[in-house]
Image (cartoon, coloured by chain):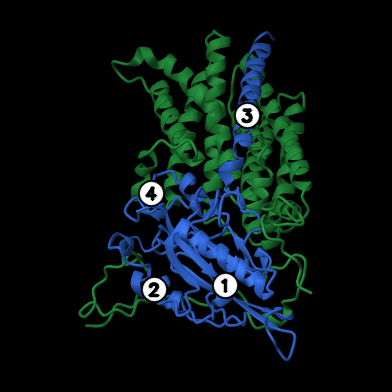
Chain colours: A green, B blue
Amino acid sequence: MNPVRDGRQVDPEIGSLLGEAAGQIAKNIEAAKTPFEVWKENPSARQQMSDEPSYYNRPLVKEPVWVWSVPLYFYAGGAAGASLALAAAAQLLDGRPNKLIPYCRRIGLAGVTLGSGLLIYDLGRPGRFFNMLRVFRPTSPMNMGSWLLAAAGSLSALAVFEIPGIKRFRNTSAIGAGILGIPLSGYTGVLLANTAIPVWQAASRMLPVLFTASGMASAGALLHFIDLPSREKTIARRFAMTGQTAELIAMFALERQVYKVERINKPLKQGFSGFLWKTARVLGAASLALAFLPTKSRGVKTAAGVCGTAAALTLRFSLLQAGRNSARDPRASFQQQRTNELHPGVQAPLQPVT
Amino acid sequence: MGSKGFFTDTTICIGCKACEVACKQWNQLPDDGLFFTGMSYDNTVALGASTWRHVAFIERPVALPTQDTSTDFSWLFMSDVCKHCKRAGCLEACPTGAIVRTEFDTVFVQPDVCNGCGYCVTACPFGVIDRREDDGRAWKCTLCYDRLKEDMTPACAKVCPTESIVFGDIDELRRRANRRVSDLHAAGLKDAYLYGADAASQPGTEGLNAFFLLVDKPQAYNLPPDPIVPTKKIKESWASLALGRIAMALATAVCVAAGGQR
């Protein structure tokens, strides 16, 4: 029998796999190769004494392993949360027959459903997605978010479908979904802030605000595509413009917060993530300007919706990419995890070797 | 039981990588491919899902005060490992409860619970834990949980030929480490210090169950100067979210009320 080529060199006929990592699946052993470019120059020779040394410039923290579906989820969850909140507000404050409410509830349910799917797609073991609700752990924003998503999802389903027997709870569920919808659109900001990734951690104060505002903008952008009676159209338009303005202000405030620390701001300024960040700003401003035009033209409204949606998506992809780029810079990580410039948290004095 | 951990004294590490090999063999970890990096003798590069011990090789153009060399040169080695933080970022971030604190006060990932969400990967301030793509789950050093249960020494400490890696009760290890630092200071190696030995010197993690004796800045070994568990700072972020929620609720209410009057 051929020994299994899993990089363990254990012939299953002779040895048994009982170690703690024996269950670790390893398929790509043959394909494993140098994970970065080497031998352009001698890396050891470059090591010099400096005030801020690094280990051959290798990253300190690990890059996020999340794929495209996670920023898409941030978008879907954000838009869903904000539109559920708008539906609840319209139901409580407007009180007149209203086409906006069912639309918003449906956007909410669709976003939550689609978002859950996107999150499950990203899992390394998608079959175990239900383990997310195995514990209740307030220290983990991802766990809190899973509970929020599950609760808001169930309530919005009750609000949208006329389920025989519990139909009379429809409006109550919708209000519940609306109350949960607001944190649902913003908790992802806390989720990113609660990491060791320098740029995300540096933006910890503004990220939740940005995600809440951007969720509002995303939901507003979707409402641009829908034909509503004129009074409700005004509500939707105001909602979209408020969200879009808040998003732009929050982006600006986040930049200010991150720019305070040198090196950490790079991913928002340079590279692909910087390009996406700037694109999001331009698209957001364009959407706001188009929504502001006092025209009844269908085309202009659609364009505002397209720009707003594109801005929200670009923003989320830019933040993930910025996190990846930020993790690659060990000195940014060192800078982020330092309390005292002279003495890096040790008791014994650490003198520079002369 | 009590708190168990490692004290890694880098001044007597000879860079033999026996710990890396013993770890791979005992835990039956797959290899990560063979390649040459040119980073001194370090071809392991970093800790990862299938690498739970990593020996770092630091070449410096200065001599250690206690060494007599013909040219200005010193070679530092450090066997890096999961620090089993007293306050662990990975554990606090884990949404499934897959990462637990064991009876030995170590941090353990249960492979039968982990669903591979990848959140712990970004939550570790040391970049230790990682998700293996073809496996789908997150993996890291278990501090040989299976061996501890049988009252055995973890594989890396057992095999270390110079006792650079010492396993034992944390309190005992701390005493031993402090003795070693004063001995080194007396011998003239004034740069020697302990990294992460207790909560007082490293409040961000509240102390490490696997701590180190170093002779250069932490950054030279790819360790953060003052590691901080992300959850320690997260209150301000939740507070921002609360403010954002209130603002959004008000804004939405105003939009609806003002829009309706038209």
Judged from the image, the secondary structure of the residue bearing numbered disc 1 is helix
Q: Nearer the viewer, mark 1 or mark 4?
A: 1
CB atoms at circles 3 and 4 under 8 Å apart? no
Instruction: Give x and y (percent) for residue A163.
Output: 32, 20
Q: Which mark is residue B10?
A: 1
Instruction: Give x and y (percent) for residue A140.
Output: 49, 41
Instruction: Give x and y (percent) for residue A37.
Output: 62, 77
What residue is at 51 percent from the left and 22 percent from the top? Answer: A178
Q: Hey, which quadrant is residue B167 in on the image? A: bottom left
Mark 1 or mark 4: name the one nearer the start of the chain: 1
Query: In whole angstroms, how far apart are the C-alphas of marks 3 and 4?
Result: 38 Å
Query: In whole angstroms, how far apart are the C-alphas of marks 1 and 3?
Result: 58 Å
Query: Tag 4, which chain?
Result: B
Above or below — where is B73 with respect to B234?
Answer: below
Q: Nearer the viewer, residue A106 or A131?
A: A131
Q: What's under tag 1, amino acid-wise? A: Thr
Above or below — where is B69 with respect to B174?
Answer: below
Q: Nearer the viewer, mark 3 or mark 4?
A: 4
Q: Which residue is mark 4?
A: B98
State the quadrant of the N terminus of chain A. bottom left
Q: Which residue is mark 2?
A: B158
Asked if marks 4 and 2 fall on the same chain, the answer is yes
Asked if marks 2 and 1 fall on the same chain, the answer is yes
Q: Which residue is mark 3?
A: A220
Judged from the image, the secondary structure of the residue bearing numbered disc 3 is helix
